């Protein structure tokens, strides 16, 4: 789940102020510089592929990277494309070479989402799901860590483990003036820590606009005239931005779990609220049909019943092994399970456990969401997520608008209502020390070949309607998948979707217009 169902790490209700929503990056605020101007030394670099041992962050990474079929390297890029002779950044990449070199088409770059998800950690799992089929036979599979993420350098590192643990423990659901002031003070402290520990020059240049420019260098340095790319969730934003800046340099692009760049921040938040409530309702309908469902026997009352179970955790956390489960982590665990139908059974059992004073399952789900390793350490996902969002989005500075978003979100998604009322707190990005580099607007990519957008009907984080909208903006082919999960293509969950993506990537043969892939039963697990 943590890798193959990697989510847009996004929480939609502003009252849970310790978490944020992913705001879609969109058209660059200023026209892109000419693609090659001043970049000759970067385009001429020779990559040194070798062992991935030094790229591992966790025990799971070390185990995966020990497989000799994977090799790794760093790609050098300008930190600031407006000053290509200045400081540089290094983009980490992990590769599985094409299994049939004689039939090799080129490289296939992949991104798992986030923002903040590590493509280097993701690629071994995706390669395992793809298996030995045509995509693996004919492409070098490449996962990369976008600038600032994972083991790319410089790395976004604003908080240490104790600070992250403290942020998770702080509920931030007090909507009184004092509670709002406390929450906003924490946002300001985080912004200052990032400025002090990462540097303003890095913070100003980690947006999706510049990730797309890095990809433009990467595909040329590995020897491909044009880019072949699969982006999941936030990875669709990278793809859309690349298509807008470099439409003539796209060979093939699969965008699965689409973020709609035409939505303004308010629309984006409310759309996601609807998506998560729909996913919860689908889970509740399945749950109440089984005996012993902790949400009762009537799906109509499931949102209320969920909060009856979880609100006591606001004041009285329950044991979870040698740790405890509080309200915020419990709700994060619920959201995590809604990303994939295969986790519904684990969620159901977790809610039963909470009723028995045991928070084990929900805390495990929350830990997976935050990428907490068994030793208690974290990836830099929690830090990279807001840092990248804040240079990709508009600023919310009107408290009345913040209050209206909060009020409407609670109406749309009652399953997420902590019972403390709406909040007029501003958001983390409202206090960010560097300006955004993107602004809302539809994708404009004249000359772009027809690409493939995949959208699941039950996707909670990037609702189906977002995929429909992105496909229309890009004049792309839309593949609808009847699926209660976040992303699906090339992951073994739906044969129809996998086949459509494979035929397009290998042969550039798109599915017929208005094709729908029927639902398949989820694999056992959870």
Image: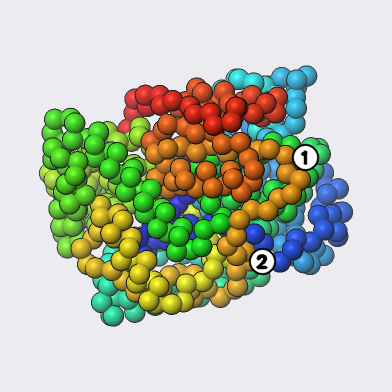
Question: How does the figure colour the protein chain or chains?
Answer: rainbow
Identify which residue is drawn at 49% across, 54% down.
381
Q: Which mark is residue 308?
A: none
Camera-near label (1 vs 2) is 2
Classify mark 1: helix, strand or loop: loop
Towards the viewer: 50 or 407: 407
Residue 5, position as x, y percentages in the image: 45, 38
Q: Is residue 141 left or right of residue 180?
A: right
Which residue carries the number 2 mark? 29
Distance (Cα) linking label 1 and label 2: 25 Å
Identify which residue is drawn at 60% across, 73% down.
435
Q: Identify the image quadrant of the C terminus.
A: top left
Q: Identify the image quadrant of the N terminus.
A: top left
Identify which residue is drawn at 40% across, 73% down.
401
Quadrant of res 36: bottom right
Dot 2 crowding, Cα within 10 Å, few <14, some 14–19, many 20+: few
Q: Is residue 412 visible?
A: yes
Which residue carries the number 1 mark? 226
Towards the viewer: 319 or 300: 300
Q: Is residue 267 left or right of residue 366?
A: right
Number of residue marks: 2
Residue 357, position as x, y percentages in the image: 14, 47
Classify mark 2: helix, strand or loop: loop
Residue 444, position as x, y percentages in the image: 68, 53
Residue 200, position as x, y percentages in the image: 62, 72
Towards the viewer: 406 or 84: 406
Q: Do labels 1 and 2 touch, CB within 8 Å?
A: no
Up/down of 113 relative to 13, above or below: above
Identify which residue is drawn at 61% across, 49% down.
473
Pointer 1 or 2: first along the chain: 2
Q: Is residue 376 visible?
A: no
């Amino acid at each position: 789940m943590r890798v193959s169902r990697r989510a847009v790490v996004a929480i939609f209700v502003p009252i849970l102020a310790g978490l944020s929503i992913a705001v879609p990056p969109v058209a660059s605020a200023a026209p892109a510089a000419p693609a090659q101007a001043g970049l000759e030394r970067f385009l001429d670099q020779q990559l040194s592929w070798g062992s991935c041992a030094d790229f591992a962050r966790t025990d799971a990474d070390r185990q995966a990277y020990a497989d000799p079929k994977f090799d790794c390297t760093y790609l050098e890029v300008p930190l600031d494309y407006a000053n290509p002779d200045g400081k540089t950044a290094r983009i980490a990449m992990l590769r599985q070479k094409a299994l049939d070199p004689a039939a090799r088409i080129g490289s296939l770059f992949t991104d798992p989402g986030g923002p903040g998800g590590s493509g280097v950690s993701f690629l071994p799992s995706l390669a395992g799901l793809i298996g030995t089929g045509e995509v693996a036979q004919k492409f070098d599979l490449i996962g990369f860590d976008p600038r600032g993420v994972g083991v790319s350098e410089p790395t976004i590192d604003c908080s240490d483990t104790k600070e992250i643990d403290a942020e998770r423990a702080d509920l931030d659901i007090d909507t009184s003036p004092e509670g709002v002031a406390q929450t906003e003070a924490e946002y300001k402290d985080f912004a200052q820590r990032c400025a002090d520990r990462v540097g303003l020059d890095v913070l100003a240049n980690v947006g999706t606009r510049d990730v797309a420019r890095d990809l433009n260098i990467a595909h040329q340095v590995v020897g491909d005239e044009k880019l072949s790319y699969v982006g999941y969730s936030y990875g669709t934003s990278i793809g859309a931005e690349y298509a807008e800046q470099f439409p003539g340099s796209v060979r093939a692009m699969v965008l699965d779990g689409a973020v709609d760049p035409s939505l303004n921040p308010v629309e984006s938040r409310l759309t996601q609220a609807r998506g998560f409530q729909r996913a919860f309702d689908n889970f509740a309908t399945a749950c109440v049909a089984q005996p012993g469902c902790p949400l009762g026997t009537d799906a109509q009352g499931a949102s209320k019943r969920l909060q009856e179970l979880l609100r006591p955790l606001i004041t009285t956390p329950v044991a979870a092994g040698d740790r405890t489960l509080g309200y915020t982590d419990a709700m994060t665990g619920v959201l995590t399970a809604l990303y994939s139908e295969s986790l519904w059974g684990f969620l159901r059992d977790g809610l039963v456990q909470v009723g028995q004073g045991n928070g084990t399952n929900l805390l495990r789900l929350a830990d997976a969401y935050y990428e907490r390793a068994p030793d208690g350490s974290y990836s830099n996902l929690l830090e990279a997520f807001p840092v990248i969002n804040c240079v990709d989005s508009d600023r919310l500075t009107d408290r009345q608008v913040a209050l209206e978003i909060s009020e409407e979100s609670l109406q749309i998604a009652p399953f997420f209502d902590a019972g403390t009322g709406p909040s007029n707190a501003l958001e983390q990005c409202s206090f960010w020390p560097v300006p955004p580099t993107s602004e809302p607007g539809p994708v404009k990519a004249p000359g772009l070949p027809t690409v493939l957008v995949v959208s699941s009907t039950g996707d909670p984080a990037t609702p189906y309607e977002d995929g429909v909208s992105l496909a229309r903006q890009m004049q792309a082919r839309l593949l609808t998948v009847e699926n209660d999960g976040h992303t699906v293509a090339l992951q073994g969950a739906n044969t129809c979707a996998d086949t459509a993506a494979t035929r397009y990537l290998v042969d550039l043969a798109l599915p017929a217009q208005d094709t729908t892939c029927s639902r398949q039963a989820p694999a056992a697990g959870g």
